[in-house]
Image: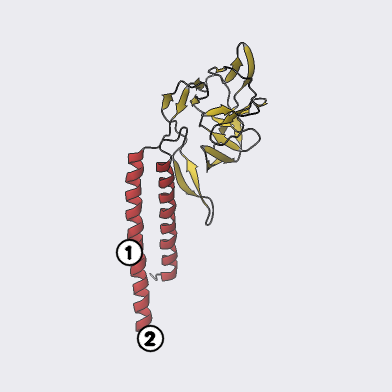
Amino acid sequence: MEIDMDELGSVLLAAMRADMDRVGAIAHNVANVSTAGFKRVFSMAGGPGEPFLQPDRRQGALSRTGSPLDVAMEGRGFLAVEGQPLLSRGGMLRRDDQGRLVFAGSGLPVAGEEGALLLQAGAFRIDASGALFQGERRVGRLRKVQPAPDTRLEAVGNGLYRFHGGVDEVGHEGQGRFRQGFLEMSNVNASTEMVALVATTRHFESLQKVLHGLDALHDRTLRTLGEF
C-alpha cells in the first residue's frame, strides 16, 4: 500500500490542532470553575478551521446565598436576554439605573415573558414559576427557554451563550422551578479537567514525535534520490 506522506502530515497537523483546541477548552473550564452558572465546554468542529466551544448542559449544584438578587434554575431551561439571541444559567442579577432587572456580569436585560422586567425601588420576590412580585402586585415573569436539540450553543463570556438555531418556550408546570436566594454553581470538575489536560498534552507530544519522524524520513528520501 502506497503512503502519501503529504497527506499523512496533513492528518497529523489536523489532529494536533484539535488537541490545541481541547487544551483551550480545558483552560476555559478551569478558569471558570467558580463562576456561577458556568457550563463546562468542550471543543467541537464547526466547519473547516472553525472550532467552537459547546457547553455541557448538565446542571451544577445549587448553593444558598440568601440574596434576593440571586436566582437558580432547578431543572431544564435557560434564562433569556431581552432582544438578543443569548441565554444564561447564571442567575446573579441586579437592578440598573432604569429599574430593569439585568444580568450582573454583562448588564444585559433579563427577558420576561412580555419584555424587559421593570422593578420599583424596594423588595421583590420570585416564586417557583419565575413570577416576580412587589408586595402583592405581580410585575412579570422570567422567560424560560430551552434550545432545540439541534441548536448550537456558543460560549461568549459572562456566563452567556449565543444560540444558533431555535429555542422553545418552557412551560412552568412540571418543568423545573426557580429558587430565589440560590445560585447554580459551575458543573466543572477541576480534577477531571486536569486529568484531561495531561492526557491531551501527552497525545499532542506523541503526534509531534511522529511528525518529526515523518519530516526526517522525507529528508532522507530526498537525499537518497539526489545521489542517483
Q: Nearer the viewer, residue 174 or 88?
A: 88
Pick the quarter of the image with the C terminus.
bottom left
- 175 versus 212 height, above or below: above
Q: Nearer the viewer, residue 195 or 133?
A: 133
- Which residue is identified by label 2? 226
Q: Position of residue 130 (x, y in %)?
A: 57, 21
- Residue in the image at 49% along x and 45% along y: 53
**Disc sitting over residue 189 in the figure:** none
Q: Position of residue 40 (x, y in %)?
A: 44, 39
For the residue marked with disc 2, what is the amino acid?
Gly
When asked about the image quadrant of residue 109, the answer is top right
- Residue in the image at 56% along x and 37% along y: 106
- For residue 98, say whether it is visible: yes
- Residue in the image at 32% along x and 50% along y: 199
- Which residue is identified by label 1? 209
For the residue marked with disc 1, what is the amino acid?
Lys
Foreground disc of the pair 1, 2: 1
SS at mark 2? helix
